[in-house]
Amino acid sequence: METNTILEINHLVKSFGDNEVLKDIDFSTKKGDVICIIGSSGSGKSTLLRCINMLESPTSGEILHKGNNINETALKLNEYRSKVGMVFQSFNLFNNMTVLENCMIGVTTVRKKDRVYARIVAMRYLKKVGMAAYINAKPHQLSGGQKQRVAIARALAMEPEMILFDEPTSALDPEMVGEVLTVMKTLAKEGMTMIVVTHEMAFARDVSTRVVFMDNGLIAEEGPPEQIFATPQNDRTKEFLARFISS
């Protein structure tokens, strides 16, 4: 396997009872990739991300992190998750902690760093996302866009190899979407490896290195954004993108 491949997914299947949500998914991510996963609601996009982060256990198939099967390897789950960060649709901040504490907690508990180091790292990334002025605020005092920027800083403070974004703007008011996408665009420019499940088609078209279109639990089509958006081959991809392309 190529040394710059971070994740490789082979024949991934995920079922909930009789409902097969993911059907034989093959997929890989190299260092520096910005992969946008698009598709209708219920196509399996978020389930794929949750399997990659082991929030859901795959029914069958394998997920390799740098060649190691994360189901079988001795790599501890927390250690793996510190390398493959995740930003959730609903922020998932600790409401009883300040912004700064939210960004320090993983650094001290998972990375086992001292509080002085954790504070330095947390401040670096809070500055990066424009939230350094809010370090003493609690999440309930922040707007949705601010909460999501803190969540991104928290993921970055773990200094991961890649970050998964699960519809990071879908819980936001329209005027707050831009501030989160701006942070994500900056990360992409700086070479952060990202897998983004999104409904933001302009972001997928303009920022991603690769677009994956999922339909009914399968990868129906994938390729560079210019090909997927300009000349999609699959009928379902064409149908899905028709509204966006004509607008």
Image: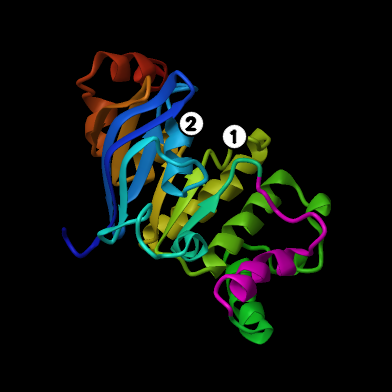
- Amino acid type indicated by mark 2: His
Hey, which residue is sitting farthest left in the picture? 1
Residue 45 place in picture, x, y as percent = 43, 32
Residue, x 29% and y 34% (percent of image)? 25
Which quarter of the picture shows residue 231? top left
Tags 2 and 1 touching, CB below 8 Å: yes
Q: Secondary structure at mark 1?
A: loop
Q: Which residue is mark 1?
A: 170
Q: Which portion, as a residue range, is magenta?
A: 91-112
Disc ID at residue 199: 2
- Amino acid type indicated by mark 1: Ser
Residue placed most toward the observer, 3 or 181? 3
Residue 217 place in picture, x, y as percent = 37, 24
Alpha carbon separation for disc pair 2 and 1 = 8 Å
Which quarter of the picture shows residue 188? bottom left
Identify the image quadrant of the N terminus: bottom left
Residue 122 place in picture, x, y as percent = 63, 72
Residue placed most toward the observer, 186 or 168? 168
Residue 25's place in the image compared with 161, above or below, is above
Q: Is residue 103 magenta?
A: yes
